[in-house]
Image: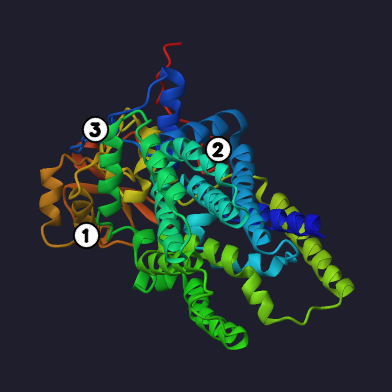
Amino acid sequence: MLQIFYATLFMFIFGLGLYIRNIDNDFFARLIVGKTYFQTASVLNWDFLSFTPTHRFIDHEWGSSLVFYFLQSNFGDKGLLIFKSLIYFATFYLLTKTILLHNKNAKMHFLPFLIIINIIPTILFATLRCQSFTFFFFALWLYTLEKVRIENKTRLLWILPATMLVWGNMHGGCAAGLGLLSMYIAGEFLNKKPVKKYIITLLFSLGVLFINPYGIEYLRFLFDAITLKRDLITEWQSTFSIIGRKFTPRFIIFIFILPILFAIYALKFKPNWKNIDKTKLLVLIVTLLLSIKSIRFQPFFAFSILAFCYNDFYKIFDKQLPQKIDDIKEIVLMGVMFIFAIGAIYTTKMQCSAWDYPILEVEFLKTNKIKGNILCEFHDGSYVAYKLYPNNLIFMDGKYEEVYPNDLIYVLRDINLGLQGWEQHLKTYPIDIIIASKKYRVYHEMRKNKDFVLMSYSPYYALFIKKELIRKDFKTPTAIARYYIDTKFDTNINWSTK
């Protein structure tokens, strides 16, 4: 029945990935980096898309950019969506292997996995992002470390520095691997087990981080990025903040239910401190605290609780269903997930969605070849730059930690929210065009501004252009939806001389 479980799990992940198929806010910036490398065989180390001050580009996601560009340019939307399903399925496959390490006779039930996947915020899980690699490698490291602990296969530890060579060039989330290994060192020390092999592995894993296009500067960047204040970014908000309660209500309910389950387990099996696995306890506590601190860390706790506590929770309910009924239940669930996946394929046509972006405003500027510096929503920056370069430069985009001065994002906040001094910022920076999100006060303020003219608007955005750029022969962009679907990855950015 294990094959049925895996088939059910894959179909659910595949179907979910098709229903939530929006393009990540930074994906277009990733395509630019990837295209640059494939056309020039060099890593982009400066920003050419912004009119605001920038510094050297230390790109901790350059490896992910290569993968994304290769998939998009060769396989299109289908390639991106299938890859997303495969990497997330591989992540959960490794978690099941970790569960089976603790109990090789454990029965894999689909429902606990359904719950865990559903409590992970869709902003982190359901779209293809550089974090996808971090989730996979975290699960791989967790499985490897548990296999070493349980089966005493010390030689497998070479996997960690070997994969860190890849992970460290894919995403700065490689710090999660170093953190996990540090927790194992502390936990096994408390378990009174030898830790020398883990310390040596940690040193080697740190050493391979120097193997990157930027050398030691990369490590300095990672340290700065880890300690950087990100109070304006949604996914870095606390789980119990106003934004956190809005985006992660299911996760909050989940962590309130967990103490009840642990209390029932403790009363039933009466574990004592001497017998408690300190490594397991430490990983669960640290990942829980991190998940409370930031929405972004919630998947790590979800993965840890699934890998470490699956067997414990099933021991609470030791009255098993008759085998035939249990098998029928899993087969029915597989049938439901099969219908779910087929429905997703039929309704989405396996296409990525870019409707969340200011596509009409961008098309207006492109159609009329309007040149000038653009201020737009932080999350829309890479899309606007990707579509409008070289006629237009942007204020900033999602590379804020890699390219821009730390205070620039606060300037953008002041403008968007119409805070004191926001109009002075418009004079300080040479802004010719504003793509205003209607959810911010700047939209209402700009309608009263005499220096800008409202040229077009869509349900969520409005386009304001400086008076001196206005012409009488402006054309209205096409309203044919198919055009925007087919051209969403078109760009004038091209390093080829052909």
Residue 362 is drawn in which quadrant? top left
**Residue drawn at 62 percent across, 57 percent down:** 98
* Disc 1 from disc 2: Cα separation: 32 Å
Sequence order check, earlier mark of 2 and 3 = 3
Sequence order check, earlier mark of 3 and 1 = 3
Q: Are marks 2 and 3 in contact (CB under 8 Å)?
A: no
- Res 414 seen here: yes
Residue at mark 3? 56
Q: Are marks 1 and 2 in contact (CB under 8 Å)?
A: no
Residue 255 lies, with reference to residue 90, above or below; the image says below
Residue at mark 2? 483
Circle 3 residues within 10 Å: few <14, some 14–19, many ≥20: few
Percent position of residue 337, x then y: 74, 61
Percent position of residue 229, x then y: 25, 57
Sequence order check, earlier mark of 1 and 2 = 1
Instruction: Please state which of residues 368 and 3 is positioned toward the viewer in this rendering.
Output: 3
> Quick one: SS at disc 3?
loop
Left or right of 1: which side holds 289?
A: left
Q: Which mark is residue 11?
A: none
Q: Residue furthest right?
A: 324
Residue at mark 1? 445
Q: Residue furthest bottom?
A: 267
Circle 2 residues within 10 Å: few <14, some 14–19, many ≥20: few
Residue 179 is drawn in which quadrant? bottom left
Q: Amino acid at mark 3?
A: Arg
Percent position of residue 47, x then y: 28, 32
> Quick one: SS at disc 1?
helix
Instruction: Please state which of residues 398 and 57 is positioned toward the viewer in this rendering.
Output: 57
* Disc 3 from disc 1: Cα separation: 35 Å
Left or right of 246: which side holds 417?
A: left
Q: Amino acid at mark 1?
A: Glu
